[in-house]
Amino acid sequence: MPVRVVSAEESAERDRAAIERGTLSRTLMQRAGAAAAGEIARAFGARLNDGVMIFAGTGNNGGDGWVVAGCLARLGVPVSVVESGDPTTPDAIAERRAAVEAVSVLQGPIAESEPGVPGVVVDALLGTGFRGDPRGRVRDSIATVNLLRQRGSRVASLDIPSALDATTGEHAGCVVADMTLSFGGLKRGLLLARDCAGEIVVIDIGLDDGGVDGGLPLLVDRDWVAARIPPIRFDAHKGQRKHLAIIAGGPGMAGAAVLATRAALRSGIGLVRTIVAGENAAAVLAATPSALISSWPFTADEMEREISSWADAIVIGPGIGRSKEARELLDLVLRGTRHPIILDADAINAFEGDVPALRDHLRGRQSMVTPHPAEFARLAGTDVKTVLAERFDIGRSLASDLGAAVLLKGTPTVIFAPTGERLVSARGTAALGTGGSGDVLAGIAGTILAQTGNAMIAAGCAAWVHGRAAELCGYVRGTTLEDVLYALPRAWNEEEIPLESPLIARLPAVAQ
């Protein structure tokens, strides 16, 4: 089932749409709470024997908590509920009434010395509609939840860690969870504050499309990638696996060309020709003996022979620099070819503030630009702060203006199509936050662009596999891009572990 990435407002709109189509709001609450209780029982197992303490707010998030309380109590789990106040919504009042006889009820806040350390704490204080800073009993309850976690309890938050902004990810004074159970869709804020969310589990509560979901970003997962990658037949030869030209590696930047080339080879390309500044040719050949190596600058005739008549796709930009020679090379390639193309790094910077010129070069071909936030800001004529604040939306107009897929790097990676479609890849670790990571991504994306001819597919697959390979390394400190490259075959070929309904997505807690 497709998983949509939503703001707080979009989440509320999906709920409203489901209710207007005939689903009772209390039914949605019961589905959410029952599924959350089942996942808490599965995840924390024997810890339930030490009791579950649920911190319930006064709104519908507290109502979800009361559903969890009733479900776990019926399983024989000792459950206590700490209330921050009396329920204020009809559904929460009804669910409290249904569960209250089976649990112990405490009025919050509770003193530090009062509770033992329960095996599991459930945070059901504040939901996705909350803004600002928590106050009073809710603030005190959040402090108690975090204290209990420090003392050894495991914390599960319902829908969003309390006081974490579901849209912006702002999280001063929020609950820090070991697991967050997100209902119906994946909240933007969870992806922007992964260190507060722990493992993220997305639960289907029956918010079927109904015309609301089409414009929302889609979370890329292994099934999405597997369905779009062309299989490599047992008798495939290098021509069928396609040819990729990588134009990279200006003076002093041989490493960028090496990383991009190795990533393409580890992603299944049939043949790669890497074209680098002449002084780097020997070093790149020694590092990537499976590749064909040529030197730039070159003439139009050489470009015809080595790119135009040979390649199925082009990657240009990793490490080419911003010299006059590099710009002439970029112009020659863009004017002289109509191949599917990826512009990375300084190939993007060359068009700083000049979107119309880049659009003219990209018109009529499948194309992708892969900026990090600063490169995006330079190209689009804005500032990095704005790019980061509007990362889920800001690329829509640029993609439309360029007629190209825009892969905005970051945490998470957001990909924009000229048609308005958006993809989100939430895989990866801070191990990718190092020089050369974008070069690896470009090599992966170039392979898939050559093999599919579709820039959005290439962008979505590359972002996901790049991130998954980093996760497979297991650590952040001590992991290098060589480790990520070695993990690529497993990332491409790892089998998906099916999720049991109603779970529709699972994202691991971030590695430290």
Image: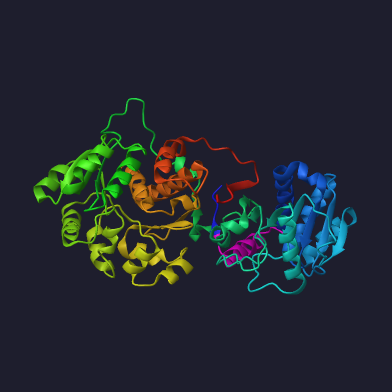
Q: Nearer the viewer, residue 26 or 360?
A: 360
| 7 to 284, vertically: above or below | below
Q: Position of residue 287 (x, y in %)?
A: 28, 39
Q: Magenta stretch: residue 12 in it? A: yes
Q: Position of residue 349 (x, y in %)?
A: 28, 63
Q: Is residue 192 visible?
A: yes
- Would residue 312 appear left or right of 429 to someone viewing this image? left
Q: Position of residue 201 (x, y in %)?
A: 62, 50
| 296 to 192, vertically: above or below | above
- Would residue 299 appear left or right of 234 to someone viewing this image? left
Q: Position of residue 489 (x, y in %)?
A: 42, 36
- Would residue 303 appear left or right of 117 to someone viewing this image? left
What is the magenta segment's predominant secondary structure? helix
Q: Residue at x 27, y 54 (%)?
A: 319
Q: Magenta stretch: residue 160 in it? A: no
Q: Nearer the viewer, residue 383 or 288?
A: 288
What's drawn in magenta, residue-wise?
6-24
- Would residue 174 appear left or right of 351 to someone viewing this image? right
**Residue projecting furthest to the front:** 478
